[in-house]
Amino acid sequence: MPNSASSVVAIDGPSASGKSTVSRRVAAELDWCYVDSGALYRGLTWKALREGVDTSRPEAVAALIPRLAWEFAEAQRALRFTIDGEDPGPQLRSEPVREAVSDVAAVPEVRAFIVAELRRLTAFGPLVMEGRDIGSVVFPATPLKFYLDADPLERARRRAQELAQAEGHSDVGRVFDSLARRDRKDAGRKTAPLQIPLGAQVINSTALSIEQVVARIVAAVRGAAAPT
Ligand code: DC
């Protein structure tokens, strides 16, 4: 199995495609460090909202970046971070952050900053990193690229179930609309739009269990190191 400090499993795909659960489990099976790259975009969005920055103004968001101090650490084989000494924790998943994050993630200065930070994380050893542009932009040279997808209604159902667990209520119709809006923004933005990375193995998880998807990825990673 590839096991150098620079090994990266890149798992990309749209919201609620099952990426997070799958990526966490793949990282646990391989004993590699799990990185949720979306959390960095959400972290910056959280901080911008707290500072009263108008997140619909790209220049205001870009101006915030050099003022912030980020620190990264690994805890239980997952990447954690603080911004100006604070851990945003569950706030990353709050509704205001959820609704503003696509705008923040579309700002070119934000992407340049976060991509550079993500590349530095190989210092923590081999990584399983999930996101939208990991195989296409952040680590295009990794041979371990996967693109997870699922039918839109199935994705809305899965996300609604997560929200119901976290917040006690949810509405599949509203979740469907919100996901569709985010998909359009993520796929339509000029810088690093959501796309299937060149050379990625595409896995449609609509009819697959999490275990089946995890097993497929882990087998591919292990197989990549098998002698030819
Ligand atoms: O995966 P997520 O829902 O936590 O992502 C939050 C937002 O960040 C979403 O709008 C897509 C964006 N994102 C991105 O543009 N690039 C990444 N590598 C990860 C997330």
Image (cartoon, helix red, strand yellow):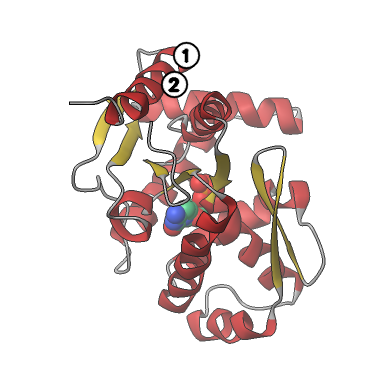
Does residue 205 sit above or below 181 in this rendering? above
Extreme residue toward the right, this view: 85
The location of residue 150, given as percent across then percent down, is 35, 27
Of residues 75 and 211, the one drawn nearer to the viewer in this rendering: 75
Callout 1 secondary element: helix
Which mark, by number, is residue 211?
1
Would you name the residue on which mark 2 appears?
214
Task: Determine whether label 1 and label 2 are within 8 Å by CB.
Answer: yes
Task: Report the amino acid beneath label 2.
Answer: Val
Extreme residue toward the front, this view: 227
Q: Quadrant of residue 147?
A: top left
Q: Quadrant of the C terminus?
A: top left
Does residue 4 sit above or below 42 in this rendering? above
Of residues 98 and 23, the one drawn nearer to the viewer in this rendering: 23
Identify the residue at horizontal 66%, vertical 56% (top origin). 96
The location of residue 7, given as percent across then percent down, is 41, 46
Q: Quadrant of residue 154?
A: top left
Distance from disc 1 to disc 2, alpha carbons, whole Å, reads 5 Å
Q: Please give the count of numbered marks on the rendered protein.
A: 2
Of residues 24 and 151, the one drawn nearer to the viewer in this rendering: 24
Identify the residue at horizontal 79%, vertical 57% (top origin). 87
Identify the residue at horizontal 58%, vertical 87% (top origin). 63
Callout 2 secondary element: helix
Of residues 120 and 67, the one drawn nearer to the viewer in this rendering: 120
Q: Quadrant of residue 177?
A: top left
Badge 1: how crowded within 10 Å, few (<14), some, or many (20+)?
A: few
Badge 2: how crowded within 10 Å, few (<14), some, or many (20+)?
A: many
